[in-house]
Amino acid sequence: MGSIYFFFLFFLFFLRIELILAADTITPTRFIRDGETLVSSRESFELGFFSPGNSTKRYLGIWYKKSNKTVVWVANRNNPIIDRQGVLTISNYGNLVLLNTTNSIIWSSNTSRKVENPVAQLLDSGNLVLKDNFSEGSESYLWQSFDYPSDTLLPGMKLGWDLKTGVERYLTSWKSSDDPSYGDFTYRLDIHVLPQIFIYNGSTKLARTGPWNGVFFGGVHGSLNFVFEKTFVHNENEIYYRYESLNNPVIMLTKITHSGSFQRLIWKDRGSIWDFVFSAPHDLCDYYGKCSANGVCSIDKAPICECLQGFIPGSQQNQTSPTTCVRSSPLDCRSGDRFIKLTGLRLPDLVETSLNDTMSLQECESKCLKDCSCKAYANSNSSGGGRGCLMWSGDLIDIRKHVNESSGQDLYIRVPASEQVSDLNENRRRKIIVAVSVISGILIFFSLLFCIWKKITKKARLTTVQDNKEEEEDVNVHLFDLSTIATATNNFSRENLIGAGGFGPVYKGTLSTGEEVAVKRLSNNSGQGAEEFRNEVNLIAKLQHRNLVGLFGSCIQGEERLLIYEYMPNKSLDYFIFDQKKAGLLTWRRRFDIVMGIARGLLYLHQDSKLQIIHRDLKASNILLDNDLNPKISDFGLARIFRGDDKEATTKRVVGTYGYMSPEYTIDGTFSVKSDVFSFGVFLLEIISGKKNRGFSHPAHHHNLLGHAWLLWNETRALELIDSCLADSCVQSQVLRCVQVGLLCVQKFPDDRPAMSTVVFMLANKEAILAQPRQPGFFTERSSVEMHSTSRKAELHTDNSVTISTLEGR
Ligand SMILES: *[C@@H]1O[C@H](CO)[C@@H](O)[C@H](O)[C@H]1NC(C)=O
Ligand SMILES: *[C@@H]1O[C@H](CO)[C@@H](O)[C@H](O)[C@H]1NC(C)=O
Ligand SMILES: *[C@@H]1O[C@H](CO)[C@@H](O)[C@H](O)[C@H]1NC(C)=O
Ligand SMILES: *[C@@H]1O[C@H](CO)[C@@H](O)[C@H](O)[C@H]1NC(C)=O
Ligand SMILES: *[C@@H]1O[C@H](CO)[C@@H](O)[C@H](O)[C@H]1NC(C)=O
Ligand SMILES: *[C@@H]1O[C@H](CO)[C@@H](O)[C@H](O)[C@H]1NC(C)=O
Ligand SMILES: *[C@@H]1O[C@H](CO)[C@@H](O)[C@H](O)[C@H]1NC(C)=O
Ligand SMILES: *[C@@H]1O[C@H](CO)[C@@H](O)[C@H](O)[C@H]1NC(C)=O
Ligand SMILES: *[C@@H]1O[C@H](CO)[C@@H](O)[C@H](O)[C@H]1NC(C)=O
Ligand SMILES: *[C@@H]1O[C@H](CO)[C@@H](O)[C@H](O)[C@H]1NC(C)=O
C-alpha cells in the first residue's frame, strides 16, 4: 500500500515537472532548475541553462527555439555557475533571482518596487518580463530583459537612451564563443550633437555610421530593406533605434560578434543556417579614421585615401599607413575664404562640431565664413529639402566617399580664395573659361584652346584609366576610321588574331602613333543601327574601374562594328592557370589578388556603376592581365549591345560559355546578377585548382570540377583541390575560405547564391561567418555533355570552353 502511495507521489512529481516544462511563467512558488526550461507561448523562444561552446560552466539564457539554440540573452554573463544545480525563481522581495546550491544569489533583477503577485513571463518576442500578475501592459513591467541587452538586438528591442532615467541600452560582445562575459566590443548609439551609431573596441572607435540626418544614418548601405523595417525615434523622453521584421515570422537577429563585427542574420529553415545579410565594418573605408584627418576614403580608388581639396599629403603616400593631409596654403580669414561643395559623403565625425537646427544653408554659410575657426559646414537635417547647420571647427575625421552618391550627404569645406580649383571641378572651370572667351569675342583663342583641350583629354584617356565621376560627362568615345584600324591590324590578318570571344574575334593592332590596341570585331548581328550602337558604346565607355578593360574608341562603318580597347600584354588568365609550365608564375598571393580584383570589378558592374550591367560571359579567358598582372574584366557590356535591354529577365538567345553558365540561364534563359555570381564561382574554383570546370572529369566518379570540389568539401578534404604548384605559396585558411565562397556562388538556386557585395566582404574578411554551401548546380559532367550536343560549334576557339553565341532557348 505504502509503495503505491509512493509511486503516486512520484507520478505527481513528474506531472508537475511536465507542467513546468510547458509553462512560460515563474512565480514565487514555481521555479526552474538546470535542465528545465520555459517556452514562450508560440514556441519562438526558450529560457534555461546552457553551456556555450566547449565551456562546462552554466549560464542562464534565452535562445531561439527553432534555430539550433542560438543564444540571444544571458543573465549571469560574468558570474557562471560551476555545477548543474542552479535555480531561477522569484525571491521574497519580488526579485527574479538566480541561486546556486548554497542559495547564494548569482544574479538578480534588482527591482526596487515590490508587488503583491509577482510573475515572470517569457514573451514570444524573446523578452523576459517581471510584472504584477494583475496589471496589464508594458508600462507595468517591473523589469524586462529587453532593457539589459547582451550582444544581440532582437526585433522590437531598443538601442539607445531613455532620457528621463539616463539609462543607455547597448550591445556588448561576448569575450569568445565559449565565454559570454563582457568582451571588448560594444555597439551603441552616441547622441553627442546628432545621433550616430558606433562600434567601439574598448574605448576606441572602430567604425561608425554617418550622423542621423532626419531620414537615415549616413551611408548605411547593403541593408535588406524588404526584411528589416528600421525605426528611429527621437523625442524628449527617449532616443532609440529599433527594427521589426517586415515579413513575420522571420527569425532574425543583429549582433556584435566577439571579433567586433556587427551582423544582421536571417534564419533559413532550408539548410538550418543563419544567412548573413549585412555586416559592418563592411570594407576598409568603414574602419574609423582609415584615412588621416582631412582625408577622404573612396573604396573604388587606388590608393583608397586622398586628401580633401585644399590639402596635400604631408608625407609619402602609402596605402598601408594613412598619409597626413596638410593645408596646401594657409586660410586667410580676413581676405575672404570660400567653400567647395563635395557630394555623396559620409560626413566627418562630430568632434568639435556645433549644431543649430533652425538655420538655413545660406545662414550656415555666412555664419561659418564669419567664424575663422569654422572649417566646414553641412545641413544637419536632409528631410524636406534640407535645413539646420552643422559646423566643424577642428580637423575633419573619418570622411568617406560613397559609391552610391544618394546614400551620402553634401559637405562644404573652407579653402582660401586663392585655392586653385582642382580636378573635381575642372570641367566646370573649363566651361566658365570657354564662356568668358566667347563673350570677349576671342573666337580664335577659343577654338585653339578647345583643340588643345581635346588633345589633352584624349591623351589622358589613352594613358590612364580614371574613375572620376565628373569626367564622365565628357566621355565620348573616339570614332576611328575603318581604314586606320585596317592598317593597324594589317587588314585583320590571321597573324594579328589574338583571341576570340562570344561576340567576335580580337586582333592586336598598332596605331600610327605606335600605341598598341586590341580590336574587337563584332559579329555583325547586333541588329543595331549606327546611332543606337554609338549610344550604347558611349554608355559602356563611362564604366571605368581599375578592374575593367579600358575602351578607347569604336568604329562604325557600313556593317562593321569595331571596339578598340587598351592592349593587355600579358594575355588572359586561362593562358596561365591552365598551363602546367606557366601556372607556377601565378603564386597563391597573386591569384588571391586577381580574385579580389575580379570580384570588385564585377561588384562595380552589378551595383556601383550608373548602369547595372550583367556580364553574362565571365570566364578565365575574358580576364586579362596588365603589365603588373592586375586583372581586368573584358567584354563587359557587350551583352547589352546585343540585347539592347538588360532589365529584361529572360532572353531567347543565350550568350555564354558552357561550364560557366548557371543552370537557370542555360535551361530557362533567365538571367540575373546571380548568373554572373555563378560564373564567378566557377572561375574561383578554377583559379584555385588550375583545372577547367568543363573538361574536368574525375576518373572514378565522373564529376565535373564543381562536383569534385563539393565532394572534397563535404569530406573536409577541400585543400586537396588546390593546384599542386601552389602547395608552397598558399595560405590554407584563405584557400579554404575561397573554396567555400566558390561553392556558395555555384549553388543551384540563384536565391541561395550571395550577391557580389557579400562575396567581396566574405573574401576580404577573415572574421566573416560563412554559410555552409548547398549542392552546386550542374553537379556532374554528364549534364553539361548533353547540353553540348545542342551547341553550335564556334568557328574560332583556343580551348574546349566553346563560347556559345547563338542558342535558342527552349
Ligand atoms: C572545442 O574543442 C575542440 C577540441 O579541443 C576544438 O576543436 C573546437 O574548435 C572547440 N570548439 C569551440 C567552439 O571552441
Ligand atoms: C555559490 O555562490 C557563492 C557566491 O558566489 C560562492 O561563494 C559559493 O562557492 C557558490 N557555491 C557553489 C556550490 O558553487
Ligand atoms: C544588483 O545589485 C548588486 C548590488 O547592488 C550588484 O552587485 C549587481 O551587479 C546588480 N545586478 C544587476 C543584474 O544589475
Ligand atoms: C494570475 O492571474 C490569473 C487570472 O488573472 C490566475 O488564474 C493565476 O492563478 C494568477 N497567477 C498567480 C501566480 O497569481
Ligand atoms: C581592439 O583593440 C586591441 C587593443 O586595444 C587590439 O589589439 C585589437 O586588434 C583591436 N581589435 C580590432 C578588431 O580592431
Ligand atoms: C543546425 O542544426 C542542423 C541539424 O542538426 C545542422 O545541419 C546545421 O548545420 C546547424 N546549423 C548551425 C548554424 O549550426
Ligand atoms: C607604408 O608605411 C609603413 C609605415 O610607415 C611601412 O611600414 C610600410 O612598409 C610602407 N609600405 C609601403 C608599400 O611603402
Ligand atoms: C540658431 O540660429 C537662429 C537664426 O540664426 C538664431 O536665431 C538662434 O538663436 C540660433 N540658435 C542657437 C541655439 O544658437
Ligand atoms: C527634420 O526635419 C523634419 C521636417 O523637415 C522634421 O519633421 C524632423 O523632426 C527633423 N528632424 C530632426 C532630427 O531635427
Ligand atoms: C543608392 O541609394 C538609394 C537610396 O539609398 C537607393 O534608392 C538606390 O537604389 C541606390 N542605388 C544603387 C545602385 O544601389
Image (cartoon, rainbow, N blue to C red):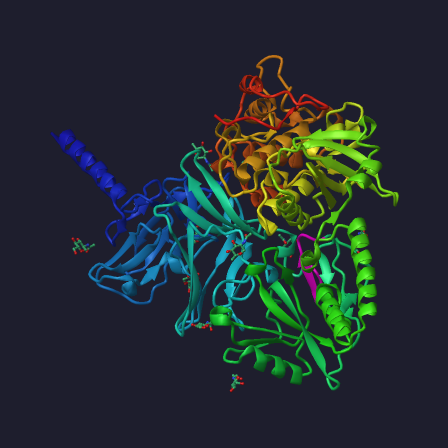
Q: Is 687 one of the magenta-colored residues?
A: no
The location of residue 272, given as percent across then percent down, is 43, 35
**781 sits to left or right of 46:** right
121 relative to 271, above or below = below
Q: Which residues are magenta?
A: 291-301
Identify which residue, 477 or 11, lies in the foreground.
477
x and y, in percent, of residue 249 in the image? 34, 46
Majority secondary structure in the magenta region: loop
Q: What is the x, y in percent for residue 368?
A: 63, 81
Q: Is residue 496 visible in the rendered structure shown here?
A: yes
- Residue 18 vs 786, above or below: the answer is below
Q: Is residue 297 part of the magenta span, yes or no?
A: yes
In depth, the one of 12 and 225 nearer the eye is 225
Where, by quadrant of the figure, is residue 375 drawn?
A: bottom right
185 on left or right of 243 = right
Residue lying at 75% horizontally and 54% vertically, measured from the top left: 319
